[in-house]
Amino acid sequence: MLPGMILFAQLGMYVFLAWTYGSISMAGCHWRRGFAASLALKALFGSAALVGGFSFSAFVPFLGSGILGALQAGVLVAGLVTSILLMVSLRLLTHGSGSPRPAELAERLRKKVEGLEGLLSSKAKAITEKDAFRLAEERAAGYKAEGGRLAGSEWIVDMKRGDAVATVVLDAWDGEVKNVTRQGSAARALLGDGRKAAGLLLLAAVITASLLFFRGFPDPEKSFEEFSGISMGDVRNLSRSLEGLPAFVGDEGNGCVGPTVFASYYSQLRDDGFVRSHLYSDPGTEALVRERSGQDVGIMIRLEHEGKELILAVTAGMKTCWLTDGVFCGCIDASG
């Protein structure tokens, strides 16, 4: 069962790491998304960061040996770095896509109210078309203003760059940019924004490098061997040598239980009152134990377990022998 247990434990650790890395990565995403989409993206980017941890762990060799290597510390650190890079790439790629945070929105409104109060007190007018064009061109880098119109308290400026068009909406009083809409292909709109293009480039570089350097998942049995110093081959050999051994599992053919059943009575057997109340004496049983163990019997205890009578006998030479329903099952020499 040990290989399966090790594999299960390792898979559990990977799921935890993927979820943690996904949470870190998605902290940079400002896309509006529902609950299901959020879970899917967290799982996707968490898995990508975990693969990056496997891929880039080779670049931190000082964490790849000894107990740190057995605990896969290199994978943990490399995965953490990968998730941070993914977070930065998503932050660049999605900037301006989400709603402002409540505190940020409140601060914006406070400043706008103060600005409007100042403008009203000074009887200021809306910004001119020239100023609106200048601000729009600063916000949409590379685009040129082609025209604009004043609609209520907003300037709507039409922008163009080659055959790509965009619309910039500004506050007519203080010139704050409210919205930028780029029309045309998504790729063109994406590459037209320097930060989004940088985010896309970083994201592609991290994913590509993770796949290029990926050399497969760590071998859980190898990690166990490095951690414990015991090879799985030795464990299997020991398991096979103990399989069916009466001294451990009992002799089912004769109805014997294994001595391990007494482990469930460990605390009671350490209680003097319990031992005294279960003392057992029978000349025939003592003679059988003496004959099979070659030693005189010091003390015997009688227990009832799942409908069977168990006799636990300790000899003068510190051998522990047991019987099941009158059948002698064996002895363990505890004298050291």
Image (cartoon, rainbow, N blue to C red):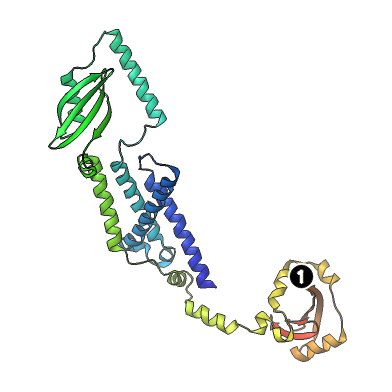
Which residue, given by chain and number where applicable, does mark 1 sit on? 269
**181 versus 210 height, above or below:** above
Q: Is residue 129 above or below residue 180?
A: above
Q: Depth check: give the residue in front, 39 or 233.
A: 39
**Which SS class for mark 1?**
helix
Residue 336 visible within the image:
no
Which quarter shows the N terminus?
bottom right
**Residue drawn 36% across the image and 59% down it:** 51
* Image quarter in which the C terminus is found: bottom right
Q: Is residue 274 visible?
A: yes
Residue 211: give x, y in percent of width and height: 30, 61
Q: Which of the 4 image quadrants contains residue 334?
A: bottom right
- Residue 196 x/y as whole percent: 25, 42
Circle 1 residues within 10 Å: few <14, some 14–19, many ≥20: some
Place residue 139 in its image quadrant.
top left
For this rendering, which residue is in front, 103 or 237?
Answer: 103
Q: Is residue 324 left or right of residue 220?
A: right
Amino acid at the residue labelled 1: Leu
Closer to the camera, 77 or 207?
207
Number of marks in the image? 1
Give x and y (percent) for residue 40: 41, 50
Q: Quadrant of residue 313?
A: bottom right
Name the residue at 41% across, 62% down. Answer: 72
